[in-house]
Image (spheres, helix red, strand yellow):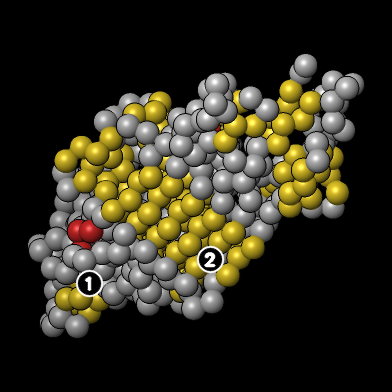
Amino acid sequence: MRRYLLAVLFGTGCYHPSAPAGAPCNSLGECPSGLTCIDDLCQVPGTLVVDAAIDACPAVSCLGNDLAGCGSRMTCALGCADGDATIPAHCMELVPSNGITAGLLAGATADVGGVDLHFDSDTGEITRGGVQFRAAGTGVIGGIGFSKIDQMGVFTAHSFDVAPIVVTLDDWDLDGTNAIVLFAATTIQVRGIIDGGGNGQQGGPSGADGGTTGSTGPTCRGKAGLWQAAGFGEGGGGGGGRTAGAAGAPSNLATFGAGGPSCSGNPTTIPLRGGNGGGAGGVDTATSPDTVHGGDGGGAGGAIALVAMESITITGSVGAPGAGGRTSANGDGGGGGGGGGAVLIESPVVTISGDLTANGGGGAGPSVDNGSDGHVTDSSAAGAGTYMTVSGGKGGTGSVPPTNGSTYSDVPVTTARGGGGGGAAGRTEIKARSRTTTGATLSPSPALNDVMLR
């Protein structure tokens, strides 16, 4: 007889790729721990076995949100889908976006938790406190899967649990040129901090680096401040994002590094990509303005997706902020702040009472002082670098756009140099069937969409 084995996602133990289901029961009708003998086979408790032969029990079918057949009936948490010629009726389950599939969870049995984890989106390596936690490489290693899909590094596990931080270095930090996806077969809890932001001139995972030359670079990066004359360095523009980045300050020659344009007015995180870096500051003296520069632009926030088949709960913080613009001590213009990145939260049930942020970085001062990184745990604007009471621009948040840099002039005026502009905020999105955000800090405000079920 032909059998269809239907794994019911909710109310039946959920999808567990670790269970060796399907093996015959022993002579006493016993199975390994966690499995039950159903129709002579070891199965996850609650598995429904449907005999399609003529002399078997009636075919399984949907009765409202209940899946019924063979004398059994159970309620599907996400609804029941009628069958067709190729597949029987079944309880619906999450279909992740961005090309992620449930098949990636096969063999990913680990429950990944604790503090101070570092994820590399290019190699798949995970370290804890500098000690290897998962070796580099694709496939499943130590119960944790890794694959690359459409410029994303996808880490899979049975569950993820980010523990509360005790010291600053206890957060989970993310790195690499690819965006990072943490994909769980069951649940994700964030009680501590996940930081996918830019770091100095370097962008977060998939985020663009800040400018280091007088050239303009990618379209949405802040424009570089160019050399004007000895003692007259412009400020670099802030990286663009949900809005345009702010302008770097002009020198007394009345030119400036323009902020990067708005490149993500649509807040969707599909495809999942990081933000845009700030432009470099101009030098106060140079013979080749395209190769010599002032302070580096801040790196952009990266791109993070948390995806779970059951639920996601965030009482801590998940952020992808832009880094602050850099400065130099010799009077060159300050670098622009990096734009915020992108954060996607996707699960049938999402509960957030913590922080979900993608704020922009602050612009550097016209000398000496770097801009501050965008904030992960609140919605206040990143501070700008300051020199002699003159500063760069503040970073953008969900409610406040980035601000322009200021110009410092000597008295009597013999030199003038500009601070970098602030970077714009990036994008956040929550895809869920049921969502609760009471008490949450959301900066910028997320796009709210339903998940796809099948």
Q: Please, what is the three-letter code of the amino acid marked with disc 1?
A: Gly
User: Tag 2 or tag 1, which sits nearer the N-term?
Assistant: 2
Q: Which residue is mark 2?
A: 351
Left or right, 320 with respect to 165, comes to right
Q: Is residue 232 above or below residue 287?
A: below
SS at badge 1:
loop
Residue 419 can be seen in this image: no
Q: Closest to the observer: 315 or 325?
A: 315
- Residue found 16% across the figure and 51% down from its top: 286
Can you say which quadrant of the picture contains the C terminus? top right
Q: Is residue 234 left or right of residue 183?
A: left
Image location (x, y in percent) of residue 161: 38, 54
Residue at 61%, 25% (x, y): give it. 41
Q: Which mark is residue 385?
A: 1
Quarter of the image where the N terminus is located: top right
| Mark 1 vs mark 2, CA separation in Å | 36 Å
Q: Amino acid at mark 2?
A: Thr
Residue shown at 28% from the left, 35% from the top: 134
Secondary structure beneath dot 2 equals: strand
Please state if 237 lies on the left or on the right of 74 as rendered. Answer: left
Q: Nearer the viewer, residue 27 or 440?
A: 27
- Determine if residue 76 is in view: yes
Point 79% across, 52% down: residue: 65
Q: On residue 331, which mark appears?
A: none
Q: Residues within 10 Å of mark 2 (few under 14, many from 20)?
A: some
Quarter where residue 111 is shown: top left
Residue 63 placed where, x, y %? Answer: 86, 49
Which residue appears farthest toward the left when viewing the image?
330
